[in-house]
Image (cartoon, rainbow, N blue to C red):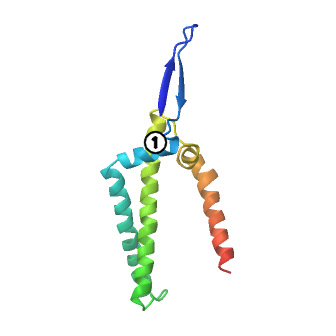
Amino acid sequence: MGYESHQPDNGQSHVSVHADDSTSLVGSTLGDLVAEGASFWLKTIGAAVATPVVVAVMAIRGSRRGGAMLPKDPSVIAAILCGCAVVGACLGGLLSLKDVVQTRLGEGKPVAFPFKMLFGFGIWSLLLVWFPGIILLTAIISISTI
């Protein structure tokens, strides 16, 4: 990001922001995400490990209580657990991205519009973006599998 400070003749200060060729708002936000270092990787890998563990424990507990039967084929179980790991890693990455967006907004740095909509308005982001998105995605998946 390039910042230029201008001092007009009337004594008021004006700051203009322009994107350099090498960066953009999205790129700078994602750059801050990766620059977060160990915290980003800890959240992402931790979520990737924790999610399949939780799913496996819940599935075993459910099968012992007489609930749904577990698949007998080990490759199906492995595929399900790998899918859970991918979903968990994505959730951990989103959690880290939310932290970066909140930090950038708190410091008054610019944030790309999609990231601001997803993470920048607290409960309003949840009510106006995440919930409708989840409902729409669920409806699309339900309709496509009928």
Q: Position of residue 91 (x, y in %)?
A: 45, 60
Q: Position of residue 130 (x, y in %)?
A: 59, 56
Q: Position of residue 138 (x, y in %)?
A: 63, 68
Q: Position of residue 9 (x, y in %)?
A: 57, 7
Density class for disc 1 (Cα within 10 Å; few <14, some 14-19, many ≥20) is some
**Is residue 126 left or right of 88 when viewed as pictured?**
right
Query: Outermost residue toward the bottom?
Result: 72
In which quadrant will I find the C terminus?
A: bottom right
**Is residue 116 left or right of 47 when viewed as pictured?**
right
Of 57 and 114, nearer the camera is 114
Of 79 and 17, nearer the camera is 17
Quadrant of the image occupied by residue 140: bottom right
* Amino acid, disc 1: Ser
The residue at the point 49 percent across, 86 percent down is 68
Which SS class for mark 1?
Answer: helix
The residue at the point 38 percent across, 66 percent down is 48
Q: In the picture shown, does residue 10 fall above or below 116?
A: above
Q: In the picture shown, does residue 39 fall above or below 84?
A: above
The residue at the point 63 percent across, 72 percent down is 141
Q: In the picture shown, does residue 15 fall above or below 8?
A: below
Q: In the picture shown, does residue 143 fall above or below 76?
A: above
The residue at the point 65 percent across, 74 percent down is 142
Determine which residue is flagged by label 1.
28
